[in-house]
Amino acid sequence: MKLTARLLRPKILATALITALLPTLLPAATFVWDGGGTNDSFGTAANWNPNSAPSSIAADNVLIFGGTVRLTPAQDAGGSFRTQSLQFNSTAGAFTISGSQINLRSSTLTPTIVQSSASDQIISAPLLFTDNVTLSGTGTGKLSLTGSVSGAGMLTKQSTGTLQFNGAVSIPNITVSTGSVNFAPGSSSTAALIAVNAGADFTLAGGTVNTGVGAFFQVGNSAGTAATATLLSGSLTSTESDIGNVSGATGTVTHSGGTHAIAGALYLGVVAN
């Protein structure tokens, strides 16, 4: 028995040491940017209400940006910054959020980006979608993602305004349920599915969109008012393109420039098999 105790003791101590060294997820909280600090750092407590800087590893923190003070917050935690929700409220001026990666993920909730402001917003920090992300809000201001957007999570756009991609997009799926999505010059996408639902809009204005092998570009894949896609310049490549391909759906694609290469089938006003 004494020999067994001696053998077990180092294992117990090693386990305790490993556990102590592992990062602990802190409780979720809501932080509202008020810009009360002397710099633009995420890590400055006085920039937030309450006067406490959010942890970069907290499980489900909500970050809300509003007002017109210090409109250039910087994610300078040194690594990826975890958050469940990134929001621009109705009072928000024209923010530009820069710096290191922001990780949209949650242990229990759907991660969200919310644009409720009439002012244009820019997120130049790279975004990582660890989980599926919903973009919502009724703000009329454009939301521009000028950094990369990567990860295993899919994006569902339910906001009424315009979402613009200016960088490289490598998430698997993009579904446009309401509002507009614009791929600007210099942007690119390897999303396996881009689906434009009833009443929504898609614009390619100089970007490069390639949905990859065995993947789809769909315009009007839900019943209701017409979905539209406008190709101004750039290139769109898909294995299959479906235009108004479900019952009650209407899709319109306008080519004013650029190219649309379809490696496989083109379905117009029919249900694809």
Image (tube, grey):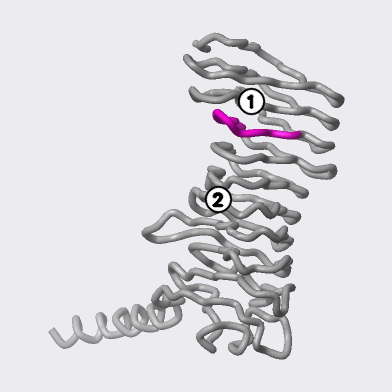
Q: Report which residue position mark 2 lands on.
A: 135
Res 67 quadrant in image: bottom right
Question: Which SS does the magenta portion mostly show?
Answer: strand
Give the structural element (helix, strand or loop) at label 1: strand
Extent of the magenta region: 193-203
Residue drawn at (55%, 74%) of the image? 56
Q: Amino acid at mark 2?
A: Leu
Q: Residue 166: horizontal and vertical position, in percent?
A: 77, 49
Location of residue 231 with respect to 40 vertically, above or below = above
Q: Residue 162: horizontal and vertical position, in percent?
A: 67, 46
**Mark 1 or 2 closer to N-term?**
2
Mark 2 packing: few (<14 Cα in 10 Å), some, or many (20+)? many
Q: Amino acid at mark 1?
A: Phe
Report whether 31 appears left or right of 3. Answer: right
Mark 1 packing: few (<14 Cα in 10 Å), some, or many (20+)? many
Q: Is residue 193 visible?
A: no
Marks 1 and 2 sit apart, C-alpha to C-alpha, by: 20 Å
Q: Are marks 1 and 2 in contact (CB under 8 Å)?
A: no
Q: Which of the two residues, 104 or 176, is positioned nearer the viewer here?
A: 176
Residue drawn at (55%, 53%) of the image? 137
Q: Residue 174: horizontal and vertical position, in percent?
A: 59, 38
Location of residue 93 with respect to 177 vertically, above or below = below
Res 1 quadrant in image: bottom left
Residue drawn at (53%, 51%) of the image? 136
- Report the disc number at residue 217: 1
Give the structural element (helix, strand or loop) at label 2: strand
